[in-house]
Amino acid sequence: MKKKEKKIYERPLIRPLNASISNKFGRRTEWLPLTHIDGIPVVDLINEFGSPLFVYSEKKIRDNFMMAKRAFETRYPKIQFAWSYKTCYLNAVCNVYHQMGSWAEVVSGFEYEKALQNGVPGDKIIFNGPDKSKHDLLLAMKNNTLIHIDHFDELYLLTELASSSKSKPRVAIRINMDTGVYPQWDRFGFNYENGQAWEAVNKILMNDALDLVGIHTHIGTFMMTPSAYAVATAKMTELAIQIKKKFNHIITYIDMGGGFASKNTLKGSYYAGADAVPDIGEYAEAITSALLNAGFDRNNLPFLYLETGRALVDDTGFLLGTVLANKRLADGRRATILDFGVNTLFTSFWYDHKISPAQEMGHYAEETILYGPLCMNIDVVRDAISLPPLKPGQHVVAQYVGAYNITQSMQFITFRPAVVMIDREGRSHLIRKRESLDYVQKNEILPSHLKKLNW
Amino acid sequence: MKLKKDIAISDSGFLFNPSSGDSYTANPIATEILKYMQSGFSNEQIIVSIMESYDVERSTIEKDLFDLESMLSNYKLTR
């Protein structure tokens, strides 16, 4: 007699039906599983490389970049992208962008050296940020790097270094401005409205120690309003045109920075990110229209430099994890503990990340809190998400995690996970090993009098 | 644990508590367990019955049954 086949078990669930008005912040249940990434089963990746695990899709990185490039190049003839290192400076990720023609945009001596080691020529690196040491500036001058000046102290130091070295470094000034968006970013660069920017331009062009080749702005981060870029571009072009009039000096590029939003959902956002954020074409239209309407000589249009990071890379990264345990909180809410927390998924402080089961599940769902594994009360990955009942050992995939997690994740309580990249042929490559005790302790020095323990 | 006598449970997992007017939805396995409870099954009988029909370890169904009972108690569906 044939043995009766047993049914698939799923945790028993009961939940009240709410007959009141629907929750306007309510979102759909995340029961749709993500079982494969670029054709590779999630479970195979975890079995081979461990859990948790970051995974990048090289195909998606290239597709996103080409889409952004097309959006700008079909609207304006002189475009140059520079990869924002701080968004993700894994060498493998950087070099995908560099292979596609993207320069490097760095904000520290550490990132600058990383870009050089990746093989980026010095004159194709944009050096931004308020922290450039004398050593960094001398190295950048030697390599003919574009130095974006952030403050007057840096301007004076660079002028002094240039005068004593008899070289004329290529520089731009960073400008902050009112674009109608709150809060106004005014901590970086020279202000446009109060005359600081003109003061910096005058000092550079009257002195002749530095070669002012560009002007740069970065109006904010996760900007949801393309029209703010139109305002900013209009102000930048006006400045470039007035510099030409006043000094007969041509600004060869306008760097509009980055700040384009990704498809992530900001905490407290009314709509899901994918429904709310502008398309890259909307940013391109706002910026390029303002450039083309500014009144530049058609034969002497400035280059448009872009330092887009998050919008290009966020949805190319995934974080795979495993359920450690389930528990019921005192007020009856369900809590699920994952093997990754805010130490690994740093952006969960800002976003309600889309987190999906990695295996087929039933459609019954329960409101759940997702905790990380840290013995810390702040370790909350999602404070409310409707998920099918997950069992210990089952896997989940956090999506849109490609930006700022590798660079901001903390070595805290446990090791940071390995990172894998799936190439265009569907092969997986380990691009960063999981940390080990030796790695974490490598730079520690134990004084000799503390080596002996007297138990 | 015993369910209140007047709780109505449909085959599709819809529960109605006439004394409070509240309604609930349960997934298929919870519906099955609730019906066992209404029939007067003990916890041990429920565990054995579920293990006979489903691919599940005893420790898992024990934990989950305890959790379900705590929720039923929380929703005031037990006596």
Image (cartoon, coloured by chain):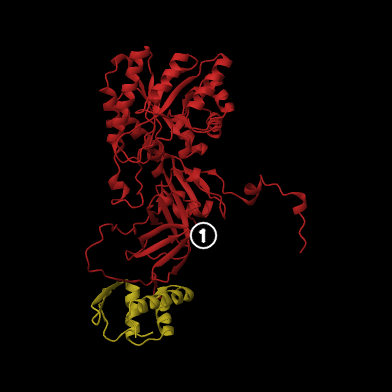
Dividing the image into 4 quarters, which one contains the C terminus of chain B?
A: bottom left
Q: Which chain is represented by yellow in the image?
A: B
Q: Position of residue A45 (x, y in %)?
A: 48, 51
Q: Residue furthest front?
A: A194
Horizontal side of A62 relative to A453 (left or right) equals left
Amino acid type at mark 1: Met
| Badge 1: chain ID | A
Q: Residue at x 40, y 43 (%)?
A: A314
Classify residue A101 by image quadrant.
top left
Q: Quadrant of residue A12?
A: bottom left
Q: Colour of chain A?
A: red
Rendered residue at 33%/18% (across/down): A242
| Residue in the foreground of this view, choosing between B59 and A260 | A260
Return the x and y of residue A97 as percentages of the image width and height. 44, 33
Q: Is residue A454 above or below residue A107?
A: below
**Residue at coordinates 52% horizontally, 24% vertically from top-left?**
A122
Question: Quarter holding the N terminus of chain B?
Answer: bottom left
Count the numbered circles shown: 1
Picture layout, residue B16 above or below residue A313? below
Which residue was labeled with disc 1?
A376
Element under disc 1: loop
Q: Is residue A396 above or below residue A117?
A: below
How far across and how far down the image is residue A1, in percent?
Answer: 40, 78
How dense is the environment of label 1, judged by Cα within 10 Å: few (below 14), some, or many (20 and up)? few
- Residue A301 visible (yes or no): no
Viewer-proximal residue among A295 and B67: A295
- Residue A207, percent from left and from top: 47, 14
Who's the residue at 24% across and 82% down the image?
A: B19
Whether residue A380 can be seen here? yes
Q: Nearer the viewer, residue B19 or A210?
A: A210
